[in-house]
Image (cartoon, grey):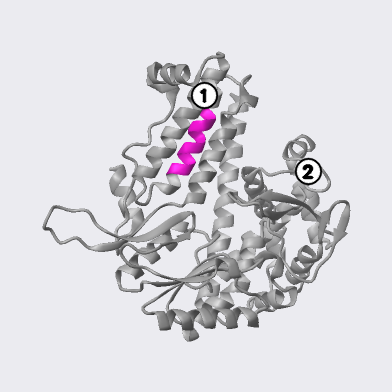
């Protein structure tokens, strides 16, 4: 009973600490929102608060992730003692002796491309400090972020950005400028980024800590490189810093841009009413990015005219195309912007399902293989179901069924046909989840969250 009471007490303490952190964030957000010209000068003491560091650790642990250059894993930290590590970090931060290690550089393949994306993996202790700093400064900048920005923001989702595309196309904006900022995370100049940060934060210790993070560098092939640009992709605080810097673009667009801007981190679109407006938007985008030391990626920049039977475009994993709604013969059917999984997204799903059902996993129990397939399908379909995706979800589910059949056939040294029959006749098809009937078709000028809530009822 004592052990149980102890656990309940620890849970209550954690809830109380969580409430305090949320209260801190709400206070900072309200103060920043109430006075757009205010510059905060007393934030550093909040970064090394014990409850803030505990929340930061929970976020780092939830995100999992690999070890940095010190090769210390999450399991190593738990064996060492989380409380001990957080105490050491609090002491180092308070005494201003904390120094971040260089990040470990790895390259991960981009889905459906030969090109690889550089990823920087900070040490776990550095990820905790980055998360703590983010907890404190994010509410200040959230008060300033513009409605055009959707990526990596609390209470914002990719589907919020997708809803804007649907609404604006329905209102007649059917010329689309699509682009991608070239090497955005590695190209952001440190001086320009710090200037953007200093518009709101003048706490000398916070600025010093942030500069130390930016200058920590990356280790690749045993060599540490320090550069004057970039906020390494993979760092906990990097998405926030990217938004802080690109918020200047969003603000400029509100007064000088053409069309409606929709930005998700470094991916962006401008929805326009005519080709002339779209060309002006592209020209303006190129000029503004150049002012900030950035440029659009040529291979991903173009103007698309949305028309029935015409071409579409890919954005946030979906392919978007103007179609005419189905209806009764003779009934008036309106034209709208439909969306479904892009070819690249579908190929990524097939590639992942092949890995999960590969021959290399024949020693894994079938139940565990089916469980891993189901977990992937739930996550993949959970995102793409909010769209006009029923046919595409059926295809992916059928592909998963076939891959399981091949896996079972290989397991029993039988043919694919035998495996198909075995899975089909098995109770509940070995437990493979069904994706029928889960699609939520979005509507113009209707909140997608409300549609999801209606479906649940």
- Viewer-nearest of labels 1 and 2? 1
Q: Where is residue 280 in the image (x, y as percent from the top left)?
A: 47, 84
The residue positioned farthest toward the bottom in the image shown? 256
Give how far apart the Cα atoms at labels 1 and 2 are: 50 Å
Q: What stretch is highlighted in magenta?
A: 371-381
Residue at the spot 51% in from the left edge and 74% down from the top edge: 33
Residue at the spot 67% in from the left edge and 47% down from the top edge: 57
Against 433, residue 226 (above or below) is below
Residue count near mark 1 (Cα–Cα under 10 Å), binned few <14, some 14–19, many ≥20: many
Residue at label 2?
Answer: 84
The residue positioned farthest toward the right in the image shown? 223
Q: Is residue 427 left or right of residue 371?
A: left
Q: Residue 448 carries which label?
A: none
Within the image, what quadrant is residue 176 found in? bottom left
Check the picture and name the quadrant holding the C terminus. top left
Residue at the spot 42% in from the left edge and 35% down from the top edge: 397
Q: Does the magenta stretch include residue 379?
A: yes
Q: In this view, does 383 lie to the left or right of 91?
A: left
Q: Where is residue 454 in the image (x, y as percent from the top left)?
A: 28, 48
Q: Position of residue 77 (x, y in %)?
A: 76, 40
**Magenta-drawn stretch, dominant element (helix, strand or loop):** helix
Q: Do the residues labelled 1 and 2 touch (CB within 8 Å)?
A: no
Return the residue nearer the eye: 203 or 338: 338
Return the residue nearer the eye: 106 or 354: 354
Q: Which SS class for mark 2?
A: helix
Residue count near mark 2 (Cα–Cα under 10 Å), binned few <14, some 14–19, many ≥20: few
Residue at label 1?
Answer: 406
Q: Where is residue 437 in the image (x, y as percent from the top left)?
A: 31, 39
């Amino acid at each position: 009973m004592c052990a149980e009471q102890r656990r309940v007490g620890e849970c209550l303490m954690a809830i109380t600490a969580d409430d305090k952190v949320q209260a801190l964030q709400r206070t900072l957000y309200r103060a920043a929102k109430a006075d757009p010209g205010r510059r905060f000068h007393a934030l550093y003491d909040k970064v090394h608060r014990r409850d803030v560091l505990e929340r930061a650790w929970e976020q780092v642990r939830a995100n999992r992730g690999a070890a940095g250059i010190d090769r210390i894993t999450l399991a190593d930290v738990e064996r060492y003692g989380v409380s001990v590590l957080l105490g050491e970090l609090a002491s180092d931060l308070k005494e201003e002796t904390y120094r971040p290690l260089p990040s470990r550089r790895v390259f991960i393949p981009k889905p459906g491309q030969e090109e690889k994306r550089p990823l920087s993996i900070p040490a776990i202790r550095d990820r905790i400090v980055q998360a703590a700093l983010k907890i404190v400064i994010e509410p200040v900048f959230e008060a300033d972020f513009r409605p055009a920005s959707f990526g990596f923001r609390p209470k914002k989702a990719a589907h919020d950005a997708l809803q804007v595309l649907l609404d604006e196309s329905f209102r007649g904006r059917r010329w689309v400028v699509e682009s991608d900022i070239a090497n955005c995370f590695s190209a952001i100049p440190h001086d320009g980024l710090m200037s953007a940060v200093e518009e709101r934060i003048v706490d000398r210790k916070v600025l010093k800590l942030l500069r130390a993070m930016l200058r920590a560098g990356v280790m690749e092939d045993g060599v540490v490189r320090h550069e004057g640009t970039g906020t390494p992709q993979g760092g906990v605080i990097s998405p926030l810093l990217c938004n802080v810097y690109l918020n200047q673009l969003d603000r400029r667009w509100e007064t000088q841009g053409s069309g409606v801007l929709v930005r998700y981190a470094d991916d962006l679109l401008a929805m326009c009413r005519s080709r002339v407006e779209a060309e002006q938007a592209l020209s303006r985008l190129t000029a503004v990015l150049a002012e900030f030391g950035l440029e659009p990626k040529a291979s991903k920049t173009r103007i698309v005219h949305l028309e029935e039977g015409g071409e579409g475009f890919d954005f946030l994993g979906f392919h978007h195309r103007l179609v005419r709604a189905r209806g009764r013969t003779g009934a008036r059917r309106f034209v709208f912007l439909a969306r479904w999984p892009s070819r690249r997204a579908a190929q990524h799903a097939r590639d992942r399902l092949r890995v999960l059902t590969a021959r290399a996993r024949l020693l894994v129990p079938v139940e565990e293989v089916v469980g891993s397939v189901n977990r992937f399908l739930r996550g993949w379909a959970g995102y793409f179901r909010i769209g006009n995706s029923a046919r595409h979800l059926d295809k992916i589910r059928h592909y998963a069924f076939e891959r399981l059949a091949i896996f079972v056939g290989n397991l029993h040294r039988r043919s694919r046909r035998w495996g198909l029959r075995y899975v089909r006749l098995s109770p509940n098809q070995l437990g493979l989840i069904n994706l029928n009937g889960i699609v939520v078709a979005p509507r113009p000028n209707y909140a997608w969250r409300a549609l999801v809530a209606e479906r649940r009822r």
